[in-house]
Amino acid sequence: MADPAEVDQEPFRTFGDPLHPSSDQLLSDAFPEMNSNQPDSAILPVQTKSKTALKKELRFQKRTERCKINRANEKLRRKEKLLASRKRMQAASTPEHPYVSRRVERRMARDKLTKALTEGVRLCVDMSFEELMSPKEIGQLASQICYMYSSNKKVEKPFCMHLTSLKQGTKLHEEVVKRCPGFDNYKIKVFEDPLEKVFQKEELVYMSPDSPNILERIDPSKVYVIGGLVDGTPKRQVSLSRAQALNCQSVRLPIAEHMKRSASHGNTILTLNQVYEILMRFNETNSWEQALDACVPRRKGFTVNGQADTPTAEEEDKTDVLQEETNRETITS
Ligand SMILES: C[S@@+](CC[C@H](N)C(=O)[O-])C[C@H]1O[C@@H](n2cnc3c(N)ncnc32)[C@H](O)[C@@H]1O
């Protein structure tokens, strides 16, 4: 690789004046046979390119040189930054938290995911709602699958991830492959078959914001199903109807039980990856407060009990309404 310091001097060695010479000056330095006082016609027989073309060429050469220098400097800067951060991490390394290189870290993450495929709690995204989504929503769903997978790679106790009803040749499959780099090597279980053909209905626990039942704890013998649906304008009870059609258990997240209304707007319908994050954090901490506080966006109008200011009378009314909803049957799943 060229030494950036050397490259830096190159334009000035070639064209003489280090103090930004005029383009005419540069032209006559670069092409001495060309006298800029002569009309263009006089120089054409010697120099076939016009003066404008030569100026353009010169500008292009200067720009290329500048880019080369910038690239070399940037590469050097990145290398120095990496070395400095590696040194810092090595210095901070302790027997309890030893320094681990990025390569080793990646290998450990893959090993953890491989282990999760046989030992992790099963989590499935039901990809059977393609016809309910616009092309844009299908793309968003594919991106959410990608976020879920990359979160699953980073956690201490990854889930054993499944996708069902993901058929080759569909727009949804195409988007998933496009938006999830290396999808074919993902450590997840992918099925063209629907949920009901892959699992026993007794082991299914369908997550639905409209369910009358509350998820209290995670049972490792169950399969937790998230509806693979992005609906800009929420379609009511889609996941609940699907659970009813499958004749399997349904549950909702205990948001109203562990959080209070802090705004008059908002709802408890979360995106797939938010639901995934909550389940994942709960699986690690066993605390709904921690999991919900970290993952329910503030704009949803909820804060963890005891954390926000005292609610107004209006907020308290709403909390009561939410609380009433929770007085329905509670299922331990
Ligand atoms: C964007 S939501 C789709 C909402 C859709 N209207 C429905 O009826 O399912 C995507 C999925 O996340 C899960 N989900 C979202 N909010 C939830 C909540 N509060 N409790 C349980 N599951 C939830 C459900 O599985 C849902 O199908």
Image (cartoon, rainbow, N blue to C red):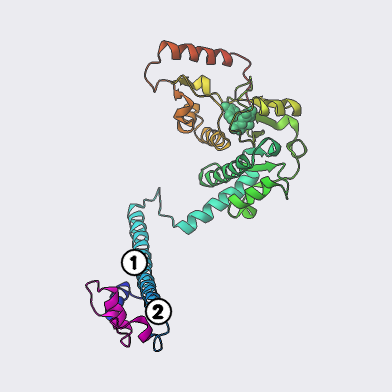
Instruction: Tell me what residue is drawn at x 56 percent, y 36 percent.
Output: 276
Q: Quadrant of ligand 1?
A: top right
Q: Position of residue 65 (x, y in %)?
A: 36, 72
Q: Position of residue 182 (x, y in %)?
A: 60, 55
Instruction: Tell me what residue is drawn at x 57 percent, y 52 percent.
Output: 111
The N terminus, quarter of image: bottom left
Is 229 or 203 nearer to us in this picture? 229
Disc sitting over residue 73 in the figure: 1
**Rendered view: 84 above or below 165:** below
Q: Is mark 1 within 8 Å of ligand 1?
A: no
Magenta run includes residue 163: no
Please give the range of residues in magenta: 14-43
> What residue is disc 2 on?
50
What secondary structure is marked by label 1? helix
The C terminus, quarter of image: top right
Is 206 or 138 nearer to us in this picture? 138
**CA gap, disc 2 to disc 1?**
35 Å
Q: Amino acid at mark 2?
A: Ser
Asked whether residue 217 appears in the rendered view, the answer is no
Query: Alpha-carbon neighbours of circle 1 within 10 Å: few (<14), some, or many (≥20)?
Result: some
Asked whether residue 83 appears in the rendered view, the answer is yes
What secondary structure is marked by label 2? loop
Magenta run includes residue 33: yes
> Reading the chain from its start, which is encountered first: label 2 or label 1?
2
Q: Position of residue 307 (x, y in %)?
A: 39, 23
**Rendered view: 316 above or below 153:** above
